[in-house]
């Protein structure tokens, strides 16, 4: 394992710590996971004084070498998504680094490659979103016809989500458009197939958009004593849920006002 005896190694270590924390936060990880990873890596290199203060929108890292020189970095997180592959890889690299199976240069190279890696196979995302929408509809007592309409809804919503992610659209806008689009497709399908269950189709298609991970992380962060992060993530989850409800409800209201023909 590298010895932190000069400024070059300290700067490499800081780069590694920054990249690990950034990858974890940008891809759906909890704040306490990022803090724990920072502290473990720093201590494995003999840094006795290492502090990582992490919130969902950024983090501060300070390390002190031999109680003398202090190094501090501040990083803001501007985008957040869910990519369990990147989170798992970041954890794997950090474990190998603390166990001495990787040196700083190797870890830095792997983390830089991981950070710039594009999100997983878009076709798999489309298929997963479509099928999950359909099977949720079946759970809500939908028919086979409702299943296929929900599959179509899930496909369209995932395409819309991928387009909005490229534009780095605010999650609330994505939720509003998602809920609106689902209601639009579901109600339009009743014109062709009057026996379609609107409740089952809308409920099933909207399920993949619900902020389950954000709410779970909010609870976990709060249980770890990180109330600020818990409040931020909880608020984010509530805003997304409200956006979905408003988007879906707004179009349904228009549809009813138009006599079911809008």
Image: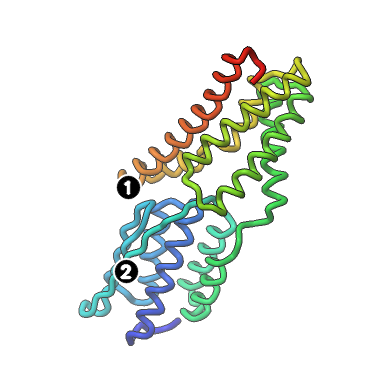
Tell me if mark 2 has few (under 14), some (14-19) or many (20+) residues whose alpha carbon lies within 10 angstroms of its own.
Answer: some
Secondary structure category for the residue under label 1 = loop
Q: Residue at x 67, y 22 (%)?
A: 187
Colour theme: rainbow
Which residue lies at the image location 47% right of the left edge and 39% below the top edge?
Answer: 172
Any mark on residue 226, and which? Answer: 1
Q: Secondary structure at mark 2?
A: strand
Q: Residue furthest top?
A: 259
Q: Which residue is label 2 attached to?
A: 73
- Residue 167, given in percent of the width and then of the height, sits at 54, 52
Q: Position of residue 88 (x, y in %)?
A: 55, 59
Can residue 83 be seen? Answer: no
**Quarter residue 262 falls in:** top right
Compared with 62, 233 (above or below) is above
Q: Residues within 10 Å of mark 1 (few under 14, many from 20)?
A: some
Give the number of marks. 2
Quadrant in the picture for residue 204: top right
User: 187 or 197: which is nearer to us?
Assistant: 187
Residue at 28% x, 74% y is 71
Residue 178 drawn above or below residue 22: above
**78 lies above or below 111:** above
Q: Earlier in the sequence, mark 2 or mark 1?
A: 2
């Amino acid at each position: 394992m590298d010895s932190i005896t000069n400024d070059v190694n300290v700067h490499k270590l800081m780069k590694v710590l920054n990249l690990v924390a950034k990858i974890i936060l940008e891809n759906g990880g909890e704040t306490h996971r990022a803090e724990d990873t920072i502290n473990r890596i720093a201590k494995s290199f003999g840094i006795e004084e290492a502090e990582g203060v992490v919130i969902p929108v950024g983090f501060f890292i300070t390390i002190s070498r031999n109680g003398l020189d202090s190094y501090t970095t501040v990083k803001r997180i501007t985008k957040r998504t869910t990519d369990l592959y990147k989170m798992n890889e970041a954890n794997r690299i950090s474990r190998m680094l603390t166990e001495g199976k990787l040196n700083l240069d190797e870890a830095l190279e792997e983390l830089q490659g991981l950070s710039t890696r594009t999100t997983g196979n878009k076709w798999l995302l489309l298929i997963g979103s479509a099928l999950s929408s359909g099977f949720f509809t079946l759970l809500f007592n939908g028919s086979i016809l409702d299943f296929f309409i929900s599959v179509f809804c899930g496909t369209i919503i995932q395409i819309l989500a991928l387009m909005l992610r490229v534009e780095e659209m605010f999650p609330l806008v994505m939720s509003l458009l998602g809920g609106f689009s689902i209601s639009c497709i579901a109600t339009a399908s009743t014109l062709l197939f009057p026996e379609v269950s609107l409740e089952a189709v809308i409920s099933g298609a909207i399920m993949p958009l619900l902020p389950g991970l954000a709410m779970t992380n909010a609870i976990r962060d709060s249980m770890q004593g990180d109330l600020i992060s818990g409040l931020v993530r909880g608020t984010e989850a509530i805003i997304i849920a409200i956006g979905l409800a408003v988007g879906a409800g707004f179009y349904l209201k228009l549809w009813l006002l138009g006599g079911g023909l809008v």
